[in-house]
Image: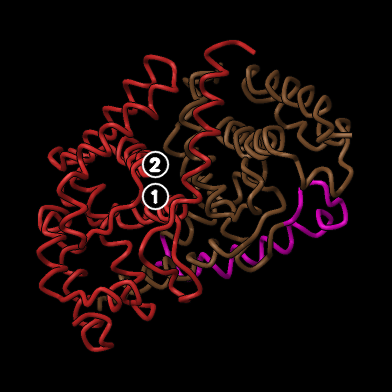
Chain colours: A brown, B red
């Protein structure tokens, strides 16, 4: 096998482990917690469906956004999933995930290793228009599942509406429709007592 | 909630069911069978990593390819997964999946329903350069997992190398590197007795 191709195959096989990284939130049918590979796919789909709501489409590159969503959670293979409301876990989240990113992406051939590390970092920084859109989608997705399921991951941690707004404040910079949707979902969740 | 947005949310919630559609092949660690949402995500990642091998890049649109890969398996929510070597199941596969596509995509607002049905149909027909590339990726992915795991889904059905080449002949029209890779993976699988 040619070396470059073998490196790419090794990377693809290593990333198979994302299917065994378990997130906090449940599927909408409450049957089990979601894994991160599933979440990544669902977010890629939502990024396409909601793209029409981006007010700054001329600044955005949907392919680049999807690339970011495809890879940004891969670091969880080594760093684990950090619950978005876990303030202690968030303290060293960047350091843990940065080390994981360097380790994982170094499996790839040099130019692809650089490209994927850069995609991961851009997403984490939440600064570019593409990253802000990608983050909005990535973060509204579990709110949707928590709202329309029994919201077990919120209930078991006694999450409040105030915590949701504080933790997801990046959504204010994304599409207005998505920011407004967050408010509507929180209202439904309060009524169902999924949120305190 | 605005009607268009509510339709999109209903679609996203319905597609959550793809996470419970179980495919025949196992994860590379042999721990369990893969589900279709995971497979879709992994194929989207592979489409990016292998894009450099497409000889006809100027004819290809990677965003369009990824959109096809994101949605083409959604029909399995109603039609179930058909094992690629199940010749009887393949006889009415198109009819079953076509009905499923019409049902599922009609949850979306009109223009998006049309767009996604067209993406599904283009993938199924395996005719356009984008569809041929997308199919190559979608089909080499489980071969990779079957080769580097114990290949249980092949072993339990006594799959032969000849069946693999016959069933995956669309790969001959895709990137040469992927077509050659298929031959290399089959050779490894024969040695491991994953293939008969």
The quarter of the displayed image where residue B68 is located: top left
Q: Chain of mark 2?
A: B
Q: Which residue is mark 2?
A: B70
Q: Is the residue marked by circle 2 packed among few (<14), some (14-19), or many (20+) residues within 10 Å?
A: many
Query: Are the residues at dot 2 and dot 1 in contact (C-beta closer than 8 Å)?
Result: yes
Residue matched to label 1: B44
Where is A165 relative to B162, above or below? Answer: above
Residue A185 locus on image (x, y percent):
72, 25
Q: Left or right: where does residue B179 sit relative to residue A33?
A: left
Query: Quick one: SS at disc 1?
Result: helix
Of the two numbered discs 2 and 1 on the same chain, state the one appearing first in sequence. Answer: 1
Magenta segment's dominant SS is helix
Residue B114 lies within the magenta run: no
Residue A164 quadrant: top right
Q: Is residue B8 above or below residue B39?
A: above
Q: Secondary structure at mark 2?
A: helix
Is residue B58 at all visible to an observer of this figure?
Answer: no
Q: Quadrant of the N terminus of chain A?
A: bottom left
Image position of A159 (left or right of B26) = right
Q: Position of residue A130 (x, y in %)?
A: 55, 33
Q: For the C terminus of chain A, which image quadrant?
A: top right
Write down the region rendered in magenta: A82-111
Quadrant in the picture for residue B165: bottom left
Q: Is residue A87 magenta?
A: yes
Separation of marks 2 and 1 at Cα, in angstroms: 7 Å
**Nearer to us: label 2 or label 1:** 2
Labels 2 and 1 share a subunit: yes
Rendered location of residue B143, percent (x, y):
28, 68
Callout 1: 10 Å neighbours few (<14), some, many (20+)?
A: many
Residue at (58, 70) in percent of width and height? A103
């Amino acid at each position: 096998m040619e070396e470059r191709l073998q490196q790419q195959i090794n990377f693809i096989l290593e990333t198979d482990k994302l299917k065994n990284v378990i997130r906090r939130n449940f599927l909408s049918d409450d049957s089990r917690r979601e894994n991160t590979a599933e979440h990544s796919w669902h977010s890629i789909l939502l990024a396409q469906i909601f793209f029409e709501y981006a007010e700054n489409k001329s600044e955005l590159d949907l392919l680049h956004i999807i690339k970011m969503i495809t890879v940004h959670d891969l670091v969880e293979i080594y760093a684990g999933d950090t619950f978005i409301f876990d303030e202690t876990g968030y303290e060293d989240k960047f350091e843990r995930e940065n080390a994981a990113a360097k380790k994982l992406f170094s499996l790839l051939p040099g130019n692809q290793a650089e490209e994927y590390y850069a995609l991961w970092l851009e997403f984490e920084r939440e600064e570019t228009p593409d990253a802000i859109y990608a983050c909005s989608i990535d973060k509204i997705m579990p709110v949707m599942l928590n709202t329309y399921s029994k919201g077990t991951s919120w209930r078991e941690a006694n999450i409040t509406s105030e915590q949701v707004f504080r933790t997801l404040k990046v959504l204010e910079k994304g599409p207005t429709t998505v920011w407004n949707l967050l408010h509507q979902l929180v209202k439904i969740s309060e009524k169902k007592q999924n949120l305190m």
